[in-house]
Amino acid sequence: MSATGLELEGRLALVTGAGRGIGEAVARALVAHGARVIATDLAPEGVGKLAREHPGHLTARFLDVTDAAAVEALVAEAEDSLGPLDIAVNVAGILRSSSVEDLTDEDWAATFSVNANGVLHVSRAAARRMTGRGSGSIVTVASNAAGVPRAGMSAYAASKAAAVMFTKCLGLEVAGRGVRCNTVSPGSTLTDMQRALWTASDAESEAAAAQRVIAGDLATHRTGIPLGRIADPADIAEAVVFLVSDRARHITMHDLYVDGGATLRA
Ligand SMILES: NC(=O)c1ccc[n+]([C@@H]2O[C@H](COP(=O)([O-])OP(=O)(O)OC[C@H]3O[C@@H](n4cnc5c(N)ncnc54)[C@H](O)[C@@H]3O)[C@@H](O)[C@H]2O)c1
């Protein structure tokens, strides 16, 4: 713990998909715990706003995680200008909802390009540097859909399962060199990604749609959420902050579900 009592003071963190939703909450939480944050996203508005709110603590950068060369260049440039990277958090993700019969090759490729390849690009660039220094922490935000089949989400669920297993394998390879790699697997969380699922199929109010998710749906084999609420992005950010902190210094290759019990950990 630092003199100020902020446990992440002095650490430099990279967050992808930080422009809104869970990534934004993660970036805010890391700053609140004392870290300096490089908030990256495909869309410039959200991270630009974050930078204006946190001058001196948060830097905004454009980054498309599907572009391996751009990821490598950004991490190199960030280390040159801001110092060694201690923390990398993969949050960028996309969801294309479709039955397998209607799923296009492009849907599949685009989903894997962000959710799996993007995680490889960022984690590899971070791990190459962290292992040389003998310390670092990487967290991938996956999904509880990686562990339990979901109707209409095959590409998404498969890409998230790839991201989870990739992160565990990386964790094994780098454990002996002081780098920890973990995943946080959220369930339904109130963000634009979740709202897009609701508005695609119904015109009901947000509260009614949320209630349907909480109650579950036998027809789609969803159990509902035993804790009786949809997650806030901050609930996921809490888990990320814990895993990157020294409180989790003996935890690696772990998959932390933050889903209110929705998957019954099946
Ligand atoms: N919201 C949920 O219910 C939920 C549940 C489980 C897992 N997740 C996962 O959590 C993560 C964040 O989800 P969210 O709900 O905040 O989503 P969101 O759609 O609200 O935000 C995702 C962010 O990622 C960015 N992004 C998309 N493609 C990118 C790319 N190629 N490069 C860089 N940035 C890119 C977007 O611009 C956006 O800012 C995702 O990986 C998602 O799969 C979300």
Image (cartoon, grey):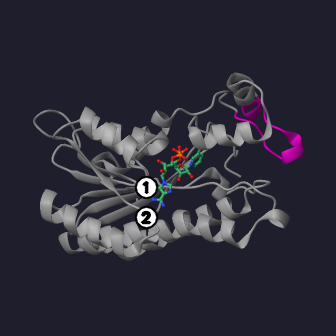
Query: Can residue 175 be spotted in the picture?
Result: no
Asked if residue 222 lies in the magenta stretch, the reply is yes
Contact between marks 2 and 1 (CB within 8 A): the answer is yes
- For the record, the magenta segment spans 212-225
Q: Quadrant of residue 192?
A: top right
Residue at the (67%, 54%) spot, across then down: 145
Residue at the (21%, 74%) spot, across then down: 132
The 10 Å Cα crowd at callout 1, few under 14, some 14 to 19, many 20 or more, is some
Mark 2, secondary structure of its residue: loop
Asked if residue 103 lies in the magenta stretch, the reply is no
Q: Please report whichever mark, 2 or 1, sits nearer to the chain's N-terminal start.
A: 1
Mark 1, secondary structure of its residue: loop
Query: Can residue 2 be spotted in the picture?
Result: yes
Q: Which of marks 2 and 1 is in front?
A: 1
Location of residue 50 in the rendering, given as x and y in whole percent from the top left corner:
31, 38
Residue at the (47%, 68%) spot, across then down: 66
Whether disc 1's CB lies below 8 Å from ligand 1 is answered: yes
Q: Mark 1 points at which residue?
A: 42
Whether disc 2's CB lies below 8 Å from ligand 1 is answered: yes
Q: Mark 2 points at which residue?
A: 65
